[in-house]
Amino acid sequence: MMSPLSSHVLFHIGPVPVTQPVVTTWGIMAVLTLGGAWISRTLTSGRPGRLQTLLELGVTALDQQIRETMRTEPAPYRSFVGTLFLFILVANWSSLVPGVEPPTAILATDAALAITVFLAIIIFGVRSGGVTGYLRSFLWPSVVMVPLNLIGTVTRTFSLMVRLFGNVMAGVFIIGIVLSLAGLLVPIPLMALDLLTGAVQAYIFAILAMVFIAGALTRPAAPQSIKNTGSRS
Amino acid sequence: MTVDWWTIGLQVINVSVLIWLLSRFFWRPICAVISRRQQEIAAQLAQVTDGQKQLEADRAAVREALSGFEQERARIVQQAQQDAQNERQAILAKAQQDAAALEAGAKQSIAQEEAENQARWRSDAAALSCDIAGQLLAETGCCRPARETLFDRLLKAIATLPDRERLSLRDGFTFATATAPGPDERQAYESALMTAVGEHPAITWTVDPALVEGFAVKTPYLTVASNWQADLVRIREGLSHAGH
């Protein structure tokens, strides 16, 4: 078993080494893109089939989750959050395919996902309130909190990376160890548990991404309500 | 521990590209379909709502029409009852009028029939009386003074005739007697008649027992009677017309 902190280089494109998680990610991207495109072709505005009903149910649930978590309309964030969830879920579950090591079990992939969320926080924050508005979000709730907010921005990105990496890597390691010690069929319950863990981690990652992005959005209501309450007293 | 920056960079690009690809080929189409279906469902719901409103309006109109029908029915029934009452009163009045007319006609008819019966009975009684009188006179015979009286009345009747009719007797006439006169009587009658007429006419003597008693002078155009038969006829006619 290779170290989860390093990746096996399969080939090079010029000076760029292409590692095994990158190739696996390409495969997952191809599956998701082709599957999504195929499903889109089967969609109908008439009487929907089972698959379309299931998809509409999932999308509606995702929108509802975004609406409840971020307190805003889900349309601008649906693609980002939904794709993160789908990618992490498929990547986690890719361990079920023999010979495939999930890319999320490699630290670089989790770091890439965390960096993507970090960039998305900045992009959505700037898009919501402008550069000034985004920077002003570090002042909330007071100026004293600016250093902590800055540190929190980095540490929560780091925590995203470590949480996902630790859970997935642990599952892969446990299954590998049990497999090497006990035999062929013994790890099956652990693999089922790994499925659950993978789904939960994908859900947690997406939820945390929503929470962090929502924290960067402009908050017009809170200071006003505080001011009103103070003047009343 | 070394950080694989190339892999991190490639994975960031991969995730970004995947977000773009799925946004274009998956999320956008399915959200468009969901939105379209939601719009269609909303439109159908709106149609159903409009249909329900229309249905409520139709129900209200039907209720209103039924109320109008009820009022119209009550009005028609009241009008029919009023018409029936008027018709009944008119029929009763006409029936009473017809009954009164029938009663009056019946009374008039009864009175007329009664009058006719009385007239007929009077006439029959007069005829019967005259027949009885004629029969009694025929059976009991006559006395000479009565015959002379009848003859004198005949002469007076001839004398009171208009000149033209009296002069026409000079051309001749038939002299009827109830009984055959004797020679003396015949002579006396002839003499008196010539005196009454004024010349010597041709006299044809006949005996007519139907005269009962008395005389009659007859020409084709004139009859001068002075006999009981004529008197009885006159009396009977007088009795018959006495009630009218």
Image (spheres, coloured by chain):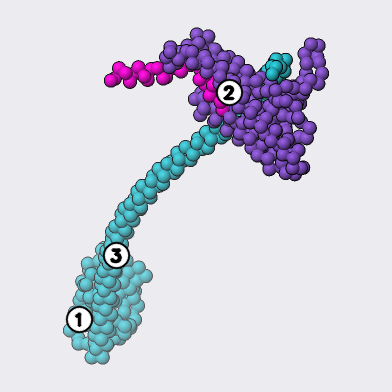
Chain colours: A purple, B cyan
Q: Residue at x 26, y 69 (%)?
A: B107
Label pair 3/1, CB-CB below 8 angstroms: no
Residue B65 % position (x, y): 42, 44
Q: Position of residue B199 (x, y in %)?
A: 28, 69
User: Do discs 3 and 1 belong to a common subunit?
Assistant: yes
Could you tell whether A232 is left or right of A91 in the image? left
Amino acid at circle 1: Glu
Residue located beneath label 2 in the image: A159
Image location of residue B34, percent across then percent down: 61, 30
The image quadrant of residue A111 is top right
Residue A152 on the magenta span: no
B165 or B108, which is in the foreground?
A: B108
Q: Are there few (<14), some (14-19), or many (20+) residues within 10 Å of tag 1?
A: few
The Cα–Cα distance between marks 3 and 2, rounded to whole angstroms, is: 123 Å
Main secondary structure along the magenta-highlighted residues: helix
The answer to which of marks 3 and 1 sits earlier in the sequence is 3
Mark 3 residue element: helix
Q: Nearer the viewer, residue B18 or B1?
A: B1
Magenta residues span A207-233
Furthest residue in direction bottom, as rendered: B139
Q: Chain of mark 1?
A: B
Q: Is residue B104 left or right of residue A208?
A: left
The residue singled out by tag 3 in the image is B99
Amino acid tagged 3: Ala
Question: What kind of element bears circle 1?
Answer: helix
Question: Residue A28 is drawn in which quadrant?
Answer: top right
Q: Residue at x 34, y 71 (%)?
A: B219
Query: Is A208 contained in the magenta span?
Result: yes
CA distance separating discs 3 and 1: 64 Å
- In-front residue for pair B71/B203: B71
Query: Which quadrant is the N terminus of chain B positioned in?
Result: top right
The disc label shown at residue B148, or none:
1
